[in-house]
Image: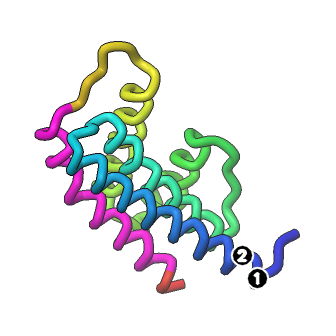
């Protein structure tokens, strides 16, 4: 059983991991490493979502489980807009494809179209964590 103090520390660690993943994504973008950029974008979102789940005492042990619990407890309940859920699911699918499928090569146009949503996503999750 983790204490409230431990929980707060874990949440802060996950949010810091998200910020570091954003910085890595920015570096990947600058260097036109598109697949790696999408990977880091996804992980920035993943770390922030896991922080949110921890904040609310919701457990998930896999990436799919994190996505499922996020959608169930925050999107379907209307605590967050559906667009946030779609964005996260889209990044998850693209990261999976870019990491594991052959001949998947993302491009700068796609990365650019997704990048502004990254900041909105992280800010939205951090805002919900701060509110409660």
Residue at 69%, 68% in the rendered image: 57
Please tell me whether mark 1 sits on a helix, a strand or a loop.
helix
Segment tinted magenta in the rendering: 107-129
Q: Who's the residue at 28% across and 66% down the image?
A: 120
Q: Where the N terminus falls, by quadrant?
A: bottom right
> Is residue 58 found inside the magenta-colored segment of the image?
no
Label 2: which residue? 7
Which residue is denoted by mark 1 in the rendering?
4
Q: Are there few (<14), some (14-19), or many (20+) residues within 10 Å of tag 1?
A: few
The spot of residue 40 in percent (x, y) is 40, 48
Is mark 1 in CB contact (under 8 Å) with mark 2?
yes
Quadrant position of residue 31:
top left
Q: From what the image shows, is residue 59 above or below residue 40?
A: below
Q: Residue at x 76, y 77 (%)?
A: 6
Which residue is located at x 15 percent, y 39 percent?
A: 108
Q: Which mark is residue 86?
A: none
């Amino acid at each position: 059983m983790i204490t409230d103090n431990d929980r707060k520390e874990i949440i802060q660690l996950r949010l810091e991991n998200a910020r570091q993943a954003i910085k890595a994504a920015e570096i990947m973008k600058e260097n036109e490493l598109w697949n790696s950029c999408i990977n880091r974008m996804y992980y920035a979102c993943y770390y922030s979502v896991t922080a949110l789940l921890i904040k609310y005492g919701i457990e998930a042990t896999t990436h799919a489980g994190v996505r499922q619990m996020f959608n169930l407890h925050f999107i379907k309940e209307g605590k967050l807009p559906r667009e946030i859920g779609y964005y996260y699911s889209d990044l998850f699918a693209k990261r999976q494809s870019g990491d594991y499928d052959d001949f998947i090569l993302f491009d700068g146009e796609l990365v650019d179209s997704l990048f502004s949503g990254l900041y909105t996503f992280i800010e939205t999750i951090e805002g919900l964590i701060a509110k409660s």
